[in-house]
Image (cartoon, rainbow, N blue to C red):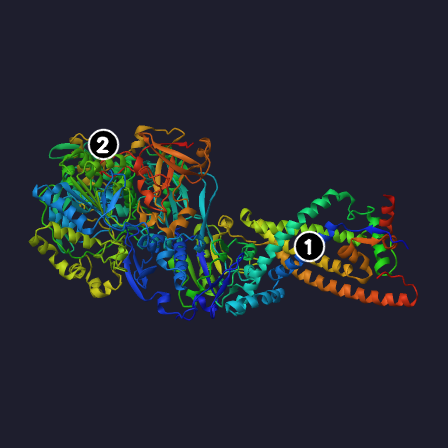
Amino acid sequence: MSNKKVLAYSSLEMWFHKHMIHFVAFLSLSGLPILSDKFNFIAFAIGYPINYFTGDMHSEHILASGISFLRVIHWGSAFALTGIMIPFVLSMLRKVLTLSIWPDRWGAVAIVDGVVEMKKNYIDLKHAEFGKMNTGQKASAWVIVLSMIMIVVSGYMLVFRSALTHDFISLARGAHAISYIVLAITLLIHIYFATHPANKAAYNAMFKTGEMDEDYVKEHHPLWYRKLQEV
Amino acid sequence: MRKTSRRDFLKGTVASVIGGSIITNVKAEAKTVTEADFGIEKKVPLLCHMCAQLCPMIATVSQNKVVRIEANMDTPYGGICGRGRAAMGALYDPDRIKTPLIRIGERGEGKFRKASWDEVLDLVAGKLKTIETENDQKSVAFLPRFNSAPGLDSEFFKIYGTPNIPGYGDTCFANSLTVGLSAIIGGKDASGVPDQSTGAISSDYENAKFGILLQRNPGGGLVCHAWGRMFGLGKKNGMQIAVVDPRKPSEAGESDAQWVPIRPGTDAPFLMGIMHEIFKNRFFDLDYLKKYTNADMLINVATGLPAQIRQIEKEEKGKSVKVLDYLVVSDGVVTFKSEAKNATLFGSFDVEIEGVKIACKTSLEMIQQSVEHCTPEWTQEQTSIPATSIVQLAKKLNDTKPACFIDRGYRAERYASSLREKLLITQINVLLGTLGVKGGVFYNRSVKTAKYIHVPHATDMSIPQWYLKNDPSSAFMSDHYYRRTWIKTVLSEKPYKQRVAIFSGQNIVGGSAGSGEIIKALKTLEMIVAISPFLNETIMYADIVMPDCTFLERDEAINTSYKSPIPTIGVNRKAVEPMYDSKDGYCIIMQLAKRTLKAEVFEQYFGEFEREGIMSLWKKQYSKLSGLNDAEMATIPPLESILNGRIWVGEKHYGIKAKGTPTGKIELYSTYLAKKRAELQERGYDRAEYASPLPMNNKPYWLEKKTKLANHEFIPITGFHPLGSFTGQQTKNNTLLQTLHHDTNADAVFINHQKGITLGLKTDDIVEIINIDKPELVVKARVILSEVVHPDALFSYYGMGAGYFRNMTKGLRNVSKIGLNPNHIANFAFNPLTTGHSSQDFIISIRKSV
Amino acid sequence: MREQIKCYDTQACIRCFACMVNCSAENRLRLQREGEMGIEKSVQIPMPHLNYLSPRRSEIGMYPNARQVTAFHHCNHCENSPCQHICPTGAITTRAGGEVVINQDICIGCQSCGDACPFDVPKYSADNGKAYKCSGCYDRVENDLKQSCVEACPTTAMFSGYKENVIEEASKRAAIYTQKTGKKYVVYGAESLNNYVGTLKWITIVEESDLAAYQLDTKPERTAIQWRDYAKIGGGALAVATVVGTTAHFIYWLDKRKKKIAAGEGDFHE
């Protein structure tokens, strides 16, 4: 056992990821009541104290106050998130070709192999031939990136709606919701695995040190390890 | 009633949170609904003056504010248009004239100082008294419009001693529309010219199967009560419409209205083409012509006069009346009509009268021959209407007769040929046997009230009387609508000098063609007084301005003149007190009378009004109603009920008859015109043929100048905007109408799309427009390229553009700063004989503004 | 309260715009009634958002076979009211008489209603950040008065009443026009247009071939908004499935791990 460490995440990535979590949480909480009345309880929770002070305890008005407040949060978080996204995206673009989101191998066989490896890891609980990211992670990374792009673009279309036709705005409204739903589901899975006890090393790397033990990498991410050795 | 208010979903207080920034706006407790909330605090009957048609309506007054306007549905033709609905916008227009004003700048500059009522009234009364001491009252002209003091105002000026009360109808319907009807059906004598009102007849839209509209947009030039309503109900009953107009009006229908684009000013040859088809295919109604008309009259071919006439007495409704008897051919024998059994309608005859052989023809034969050359192909060449359309329209008239009509409209004065157009319309309606018949055109009925003030007989000859006598080109002018001829008098001092003009609501600069000359004339006057609630072009030239209140702020005389099939009585009541420092017309006239007239004269004519107010006028008017039958008289309600908003209406009658022609017949061949034409020829008048009783292709002025327009040249045609009213600010500056004016491009000019492209124009370009005769007056307007405008026409909504003399737009927030008002740049021309204005009879040229 | 509907008859209309003026005027009177602004003041301010009924003009054909068509743009008070469906605050409701209304006090100006409306109806006022559209004059209707546009019409081109009566009159008129003009007239909106909007409570008598000219959409849709609805249902199901799936996996993992440790196959980094 060596004590050699491998750098898994840069400090920028860690910083961005951490704040992304805040903002996505804010955006989700504030957006969900607009998406569906199933989440009105969030708006009520916010609206109740507001209206307690204004003295208007009519339930429809509490809801309206809550959603109004949440809209402010939503817009504020969206702008802040865009702000922090800029350095992150730029730095990612600089090394875009070396990112782990690209497949290690191309083709249908590779995908089947990737799935077999995932089964080995998650079902059989055996060490699998993973890179830094396995096939599922790569796929979800793409889903997350694309749905985020959709959300941001459609969100800004809704902000600058006066410059657009009714058809486009309506399209944006639909796209914003649909891509969020896709993102949210993906995030649920992502969070599950991220917080899974088996992935404590990666969790710690992302939230604490940014590093992983080389031995751990060698064992759990042999492809990545080999790549690291080649460099 | 009154179960919920809009606030009912709000219980308790309301806090609204506005997105973005959080603003809490605590509102008052939702109040309980009271009657006032639904506006039934007070209902006041009004007669709408937003245009000139006085449609009955009801104002709802809540907390001393007019809050809603509705139609008064107490008549079978109840209904008001969007203008009336927007009356609050006029009443509460912040740009109203708020105090009396006295001019401090040059005339036309629009610089005034505020003045007191005493000051302005004394100034005007002082001037009137000075002129009286010079015994020159005839040099004062009072020019009223509808928003003044009916029953008192003209009367005051006549008592003062002037015979000159020039009405504004010569820029509208007078006298082409009048003579175009009365020459054929007869009318009252107005200084030698037969007179019929604009509301004399209606097209029976409700029962017609087919009708042709010429230059008329029934929804825009509306007369909502009763014509607009009748038209809509007619469409609902499936009435088919063909619109012969250089521009397709949407008001006539959009899915189901045939549009026949016509070259501007060529309505006469179009109608002659239709007449040609009627004769060629024997589409006329022979029985009708035989029974009711003088189609059988023998005419001396050489003179155009009846071959021989004699006066006979005839029984009519138990009274003996004198009529002209004329020669006809009956069963091959020449005899007088009164003795004829079976008069011949067609044929040429040599008739021996007092030993002389005279070549004669029946009048129908002569009319037929005069349109013989008007084949569909000829008509196409004149009008640009395809020959096939002429044939089709004539056939459709025949297929639907007598439930069909050619609409005579009411705005007549546009081209030199306008009188001819109106005559031909009447003649065709007679030929088809539709006049007086259900589904055709029929006589409206009306009731008359008693006169309040009987004015003394005028000592001086009035301006129109002089022109009727001395100027052959004015032979058919109206003796009460002659403001253009009055301008001629101001400029020429014939028959005498004019020194003072008092405009009450009239806007002659904006509303009458040839504003340049009109302004020149106004500038020569010693004093110009304007009484009006709103700024207009004429007020810019006034020395003294008196703020009249609007119709919502005053009681008025009982009104009985409506364009309605049935006799109708209504009254306009005061809904709210006059705003600002304005006064109602009666108050202004009483003040002027008091300060001008000798005490005993004032007492004689106005003493009662001073003591009892307008109630004395109403009582007197209502004391004697004439024109009704016994059954109708039995239903007349007490005066109070009229004053409370009841609209009394009588019966509708169909019936074929003449209304006072010399022969007592419907004169398809007008003996009045025949006689006048002979006289005019004798006097050497070069346009005597414009008075011909036969169909003639009288040309508009523009066609005399050029038979073909250059690519950049157009004829400026206009139509009423459904939410506009002449040049009046009550609609033009009305904030309630602004959004809709904008939505409908009310201030733009419209030209044919293809033609616009060849001129390198596109929609929303700004163009410069000039009259080719007056290139110095350049007007800018926004152009719209349209598929529904004839290539020779440039269309604008009447009076909606700022025009050339637009100084006054500075004080009017909603009035467009650009746009065409054709009157401003038009030639100061007169239509032959009728002296109406040739408002669209000149050539304009346009170019892209850079 | 029975359902009431309105009908506009393109044939009997003389395009005088009385309906549109009266609508604008009535909405100003409402401001006075609600104590927000007196009528004297409100008729001095244009406030285009208070014109719930507007003309949209276009030209059809080429000279000389051309005409202008004035489409009436207004809320149709859809049976399935997509605006109401999407409104997050519940500001949009359907009254007992069938009018789909926006309660401005609850409206937060998110403009979702406008995005969902296939007729592009709700107008947003930037002045006060709220959405506006025709309320069907339900305040008048519930007090036995006619809608202000209907009341204004001088030619009965607009009429209203109980649904079955209005549809009966409209069908009768359409039949007369079909017979007299030889062209087919239909009553737009009387029958369900699609599932997105259903039937309309503002129906229109129009010549069939002119439906498009009058901007009467026979397939009023907002595809993206419909997909949004499907996604909400699908997304809910997927979210549940995900939670169930991950929980199951975790239990499976715990169990398997226990067994593996028991079997001495350990070596799990924690």
Q: Position of residue A210 (x, y in %)?
A: 78, 53
Residue B445 visible in this rendered orientation of the protein: yes
Q: Is residue B810 left or right of residue B670?
A: right
Amino acid on which disc 2 is placed: Arg
Tag 2 residue:
B687
A187 up-or-down from B144: above or below: below
Q: State yes or no: discs 1 and 2 in contact (Cβ < 8 Å).
A: no
Residue located 35% across and 69% down the image: B35
Circle 1 chain: A
- How dense is the environment of label 2, judged by Cα within 10 Å: few (below 14), some, or many (20 and up)? some
Q: CA distance from mark 1 to mark 2?
A: 91 Å
Q: Quick one: quadrant of the C terminus of chain C? A: bottom right
* Marker disc for residue A20: 1
| Snapshot quadrant of residue B785 | top left
Q: Is residue B787 left or right of residue B409?
A: right
Amino acid on which disc 1 is placed: Met
Q: Please tell me which residue lies in front, A190 or B232.
A: A190
Circle 2 chain: B
- How dense is the environment of label 1, judged by Cα within 10 Å: few (below 14), some, or many (20 and up)? some
* Marker disc for residue C57: none
Residue B174 visible in this rendered orientation of the protein: no
Q: Position of residue B277 (x, y in %)?
A: 34, 39
Q: Position of residue C44 (x, y in %)?
A: 37, 53
Q: Please tell me which residue lies in front, B662 or B721.
A: B721
Q: At numbered mark 2, what does the secondary structure look like: helix, strand or loop? A: loop
Q: At numbered mark 1, what does the secondary structure look like: helix, strand or loop? A: helix
